Amino acid sequence: MTEPPFVSRERLKKHQQYFQNIHKHTYLKGRYDKITSVAIPLTPAASSIFLIGRGVYNMSLGIGKKE
């Protein structure tokens, strides 16, 4: 007993041809791939750089010290 295919072969062939002909990096070919591979990693990196910078600034001026 065989299952029917999830997507027709013609449609799959059309998608394969489309993605193989795009002249971009492989990880940026999809519609929302820029969000997952660029924006999400940049958010924690930017926030950690901000927090480290704020901590260095506060330490250099002695702000927030307990007596």
Image (spheres, grey):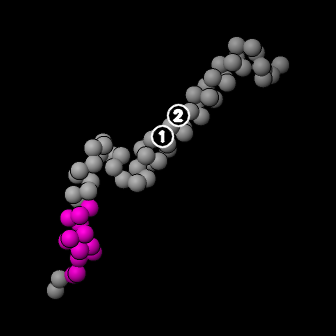
Q: In this image, 50 relative to 24: left or right?
A: right
Q: Position of residue 14 (x, y in %)?
A: 23, 64
In the image, residue 31 sits, relative to residue 28, either above or below, namely below
Closest to the observer: 59 or 21? 21
CB of mark 1 within 8 Å of CB of mark 2?
yes
Q: Residue furthest right?
A: 67
Under circle 2, the secondary element is helix
Q: Which residues are magenta?
A: 3-15
Residue that badge 1 annotates:
41
Tell me what residue is drawn at x 20 percent, y 64 percent. Answer: 13
In whole angstroms, how far apart are the C-alphas of marks 1 and 2?
Answer: 7 Å
Residue 59's label in the rendered image is none
Q: In this image, 18 relative to 38: left or right?
A: left
In the image, residue 10 sits, relative to residue 51, either above or below, namely below
Closest to the observer: 6 or 11? 11
Q: Residue furthest bottom?
A: 1
Q: Position of residue 9 (x, y in %)?
A: 19, 71
Look at label 2 and name its amino acid. Answer: Ala
Is 2 part of what is drawn in magenta?
Answer: no
Under circle 1, the secondary element is helix
Which picture quadrant has residue 53?
top right
Tell me what residue is drawn at x 27 percent, y 73 percent. Answer: 7
Residue that badge 2 annotates:
45
Tell me what residue is drawn at x 47 percent, y 47 percent. Answer: 35
Tell me what residue is drawn at x 48 percent, y 40 percent. Answer: 41
**Number of callouts:** 2
Q: In this image, 41 relative to 8: left or right?
A: right
Counting other residues with Cα less than 10 Å from the Cα at mark 2, is it few (<14), some (14-19), or many (20 or more)?
few
Counting other residues with Cα less than 10 Å from the Cα at mark 1, is it few (<14), some (14-19), or many (20 or more)?
few
Look at label 1 and name its amino acid. Answer: Pro
Q: Position of residue 2 (x, y in %)?
A: 17, 82
